[in-house]
Amino acid sequence: MPLKEQIESVRNQFLADIESFPQAPPLIDQLKSKYLGRKGLVAQLFSKMSQVKSEDRPRMGQELNSLKIELTRQFENKVASILAPGKRSPDEAIDLTLPGKAPRLGSVHILEQTLSDMKEIFKSIGFHVAYGPEVDDDYHNFSALNIPEHHPARDMQDTFFVDAKTVLRTHTSNVQIHLMENEDPPIRYIVPGRVYRNEAISYKSYCLFHQVEGIYINKRVSFGELKGCLEYFVRHMFGAERGMRFRPSYFPFTEPSAEVDIWDEERQEWLEILGCGMVDPNVLDNVGYDSKIWHGYAFGMGVERIAMLKYNINDIRLFYNGDIRFLEQFA
Ligand code: DAH
């Protein structure tokens, strides 16, 4: 059939259809897309233009354009005549039978959740929660913790410097010093917070992470109590069966020092989660506590590593890239 006749036929079909114009909004939409949609009959006619002889093309183009304009206008007139004045157009009509859109619910980030579990465990055995500065001076982050300038122990933690005397704290241990400077013993605190290290990034190390520091100072405090406290924590966090071991270690601010490893089910190897020890008398002297009378233990644990071990998360970077598919698993 020549294009001219096809145009006529579409016009007549449309006029018949619109005579028996459907009232319901979905049907009106159907009618509109049947003729005027992106793949509708009018568009199909337009796509046949390439087959038209070139001398006929301008005329056919005009025919088609006026068909489109005519149909559009008729369609709109019809819609307007059906709708009583003041009614919504069919596009805006509300279909009360459709299910509603549920608002998207967020959830607590898995790190925040882990932190809050950790706080609850320590609060249940008498620890208070305190916070301290993330940007601190060299003295609180290092010197007061028995890490003098030029001492090789400074290299244990690669540091981001703000200026020569100011650092992004490399651990939450700086807050031990602030707490003891501001309060007389006995004290018992945990300190959650962010720490920063200029380290090589890997599945278990990131430039930013979280720690929970703990410090307990009293007249009689033993290494046995430190062990008991950390065992209590691990059992409540990971359950009675989880592999856990103490290992002797070294920190300038504790003597003796130890580390605790937890068995990594995923990798089938030990992963260190914390350092701890008996507070070095030099640290107590630095804050003006009499180290002949006062003793204590301290620890600092990595929150990401604890969450990784508990929830079998195999890469620390997952906590920080905000991928909703990762986060949703813990909602
Ligand atoms: N600050 C240490 C670190 O970040 C962890 C640590 C070890 C904290 C022993 C302590 C402690 O309070 O007593 O590696």
Image (cartoon, helix red, strand yellow):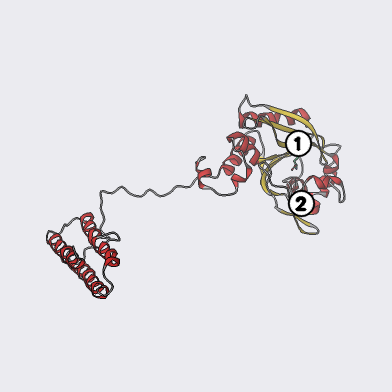
- Percent x, y for residue 68? 23, 69
Q: Position of residue 92 (x, y in %)?
A: 27, 60
The outermost residue toward the top is: 241
Q: Is residue 164 above or below residue 170?
A: below
Instruction: Say whether disc 2 or disc 1 marks the residue closer to the N-terminus.
Output: 2
Asked whether 190 or 249 is in front, the reply is 249
Whether disc 1's CB lies below 8 Å from ligand 1 is answered yes
Residue underneath mark 2: 159
Q: Residues within 10 Å of mark 2 (few under 14, many from 20)?
A: some
- Indicate the secondary structure of the residue bearing disc 2: loop
- The kind of residue on which mark 2 rests is Thr
Q: Nearer the viewer, residue 179 or 263?
A: 263
Seen from the viewer's position, the closer of residues 88 and 40 is 40
- Position of residue 146 in the picture relative to residue 259 (left or right): right
Q: Quadrant of ligand 1?
A: top right
Q: Is residue 130 visible?
A: no
What kind of element bears circle 1? strand
Task: Note whether residue 328 is visible.
Answer: yes
Q: What label sits on residue 276 in the rendered view?
A: 1
Q: Position of residue 299 (x, y in %)?
A: 73, 38
Question: Label 1 is placed on what type of residue?
Answer: Cys
